């Protein structure tokens, strides 16, 4: 398996060294789209999960037979905020996900984006777990900062689906007003902004945030809210916008969420999609048509920049029983599924994988991700002559312009220049006075980096 992955990884340019410094995730160029998988990353001998083969065998099978020999751009890393079912309801640090991250990057490569589904989905009305109101209140600020520091130390590009998505649905008690009458859309918005502000304040500028409602039909229904603008934290707080959708809905139910993303100038990310949803009424033949129609939609809507198939068997979690008479066994009886039934087993098996593989083979769907260094600046030692000081700095390769702040003594920082293309500034002062200067870089797209370490200016 290692040799198989190494050969494919090298062929796709993924066998590069680890990240240096902070790098952030970029959308692909027009005409291209990333493609990911939500895939079972852990192994089990329990036949209820439908596949007892080890991860490397399952992954090789998927790459060969479902992904047309391509490496997935990313694999979903699921990370919960809390274990509310355990004694003391412990919070979960990012370090708990490191083994999973390493397993994923053994497939996708060290330069791939880390797609982190940082979710509140463990919270239910019965277990008293965290909700967005707890986040909004500020009592989790310390935990969020520690998580942000860990991701900043990780350094590579990270895409977070914050709180787990589908917040406008009627099933996630931790974040969804339709599931929890004690919440309002404003709670979701305030919690989202608080998390993003804390990440930025901690310096985790390698982290991008994906805002993912559930798709909805043009005519209102009770199980999902269509007023997604009420849940929107604002353009400054969202990097990607998108949706989740399964085969319970026709393909054109993506229209409203796609139009919303385009109107807000955000790349569109279909974070979950799949067939055999428990509420689907489609036959296998019509589900293959639905997969084809979804790909037609992606390829006719240029702002679809990432799609993530939910290639996962959720039937055990849903409590759906297995009908032994319907079971089909494959691969020496290591793989099983219920034929011709919609039971939350979304894996691409038999005819579905043939349809998916044929469409994902399109060169439009690319394995390697684009990223850019976070713009950065370093202030050099100032040159002081009498009452005149020349402040100098250098920037990394992505830095295009610079903002400069000064402060005197313990007074607040004052912004004295913005958008400088030069790398020096004259500062005047009186003999005996002391100032502190810092600089931040801005790249050509307007992305703002961190403030540099300050430098003292002493007029002697």
Image: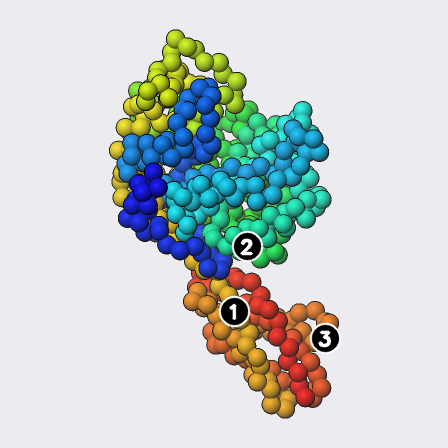
Q: At numbered mark 1, what does the secondary structure look like: helix, strand or loop?
A: strand
Q: Is residue 152 above or below residue 316?
A: below
User: Considering the image in quadrants, where does the N terminus appear?
Assistant: top left
Q: Return the disc, 2 or 3, that comes first in the chain's sequence.
A: 2
Residue appearing at x 63%, y 33% in the figure? 83
Pointers 2 and 1 in contact (CB under 8 A)? no
> Any mark on residue 209, and which?
none
Residue appearing at x 39%, y 39% in the figure? 36
- Category of crowding for the residue at label 1, using alpha-carbon neighbours closer than 10 angstroms: few (below 14), some (14–19), many (at least 20): many
The quadrant where residue 304 appears: top left
Residue carrying label 2: 153
Q: Return the disc, 2 or 1, that comes first in the chain's sequence.
A: 2
Residue carrying label 3: 409
Residue appearing at x 66%, y 83% in the figure? 458
> Any mark on residue 377, and which?
1
- Category of crowding for the residue at label 2, using alpha-carbon neighbours closer than 10 angstroms: few (below 14), some (14–19), many (at least 20): some
Residue appearing at x 68%, y 88% in the figure? 460
Kindly report the distance in space between the C-alpha atoms of the residues bearing marks 2 and 3: 31 Å
């Amino acid at each position: 398996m290692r040799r198989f992955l190494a050969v494919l990884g090298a062929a796709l340019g993924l066998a590069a060294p680890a990240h240096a410094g902070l790098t952030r995730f970029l959308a692909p160029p027009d005409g291209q789209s990333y493609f990911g998988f939500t895939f079972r990353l852990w192994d089990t001998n329990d036949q209820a999960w439908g596949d007892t083969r080890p991860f490397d065998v399952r992954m090789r099978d998927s790459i060969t037979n479902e992904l047309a020999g391509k490496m997935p751009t990313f694999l979903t890393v699921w990370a919960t905020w809390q274990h509310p079912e355990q004694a003391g309801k412990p919070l979960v640090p990012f370090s708990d996900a490191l083994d999973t991250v390493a397993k994923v990057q053994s497939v996708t490569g060290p330069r791939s984006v880390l797609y982190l589904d940082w979710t509140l989905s463990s919270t239910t009305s019965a277990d008293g777990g965290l909700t967005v109101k707890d986040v909004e209140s500020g009592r989790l600020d310390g935990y969020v900062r520690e998580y942000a520091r860990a991701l900043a130390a990780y350094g590579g590009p990270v895409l977070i689906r914050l709180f787990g998505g589908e917040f406008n649905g009627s099933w996630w008690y931790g974040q969804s007003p339709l599931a929890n009458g004690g919440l309002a859309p404003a709670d979701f918005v305030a919690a989202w902004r608080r998390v993003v502000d804390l990440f930025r304040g901690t310096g985790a500028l390698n982290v991008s945030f994906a805002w993912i409602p559930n798709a909805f039909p043009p005519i209102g229904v009770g199980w999902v809210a269509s007023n997604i603008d009420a849940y929107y934290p604002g353009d400054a707080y969202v990097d990607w916008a998108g949706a989740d959708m399964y085969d319970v809905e026709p393909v054109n139910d993506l229209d409203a969420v796609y139009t919303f993303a385009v109107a807000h100038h955000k790349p569109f990310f279909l974070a979950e999609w799949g067939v055999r949803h428990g509420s689907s009424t489609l036959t296998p033949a019509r589900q293959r048509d639905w997969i084809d129609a979804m790909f037609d939609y992606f390829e006719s809507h240029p702002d679809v920049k990432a799609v993530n198939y939910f290639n996962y068997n959720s039937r055990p979690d849903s409590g759906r029983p297995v009908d032994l008479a319907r079971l089909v066994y494959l691969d020496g009886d290591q793989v099983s599924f219920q034929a011709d039934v919609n039971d939350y087993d979304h894996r691409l098996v038999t005819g579905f994988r043939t349809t998916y593989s044929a469409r994902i083979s399109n060169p439009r769907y690319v394995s390697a991700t684009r990223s850019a260094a976070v713009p950065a600046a370093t202030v050099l030692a100032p040159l002081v002559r009498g009452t005149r000081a020349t402040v100098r700095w250098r920037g990394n390769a992505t830095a295009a312009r610079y903002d400069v702040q000064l402060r005197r003594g313990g007074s607040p920082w004052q912004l004295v220049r913005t958008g400088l293309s030069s790398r020096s500034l004259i500062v005047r002062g009186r003999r005996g006075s002391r100032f502190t200067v810092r600089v931040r870089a801005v790249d050509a797209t307007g992305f703002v980096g961190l403030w540099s370490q300050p430098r003292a200016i002493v007029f002697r």
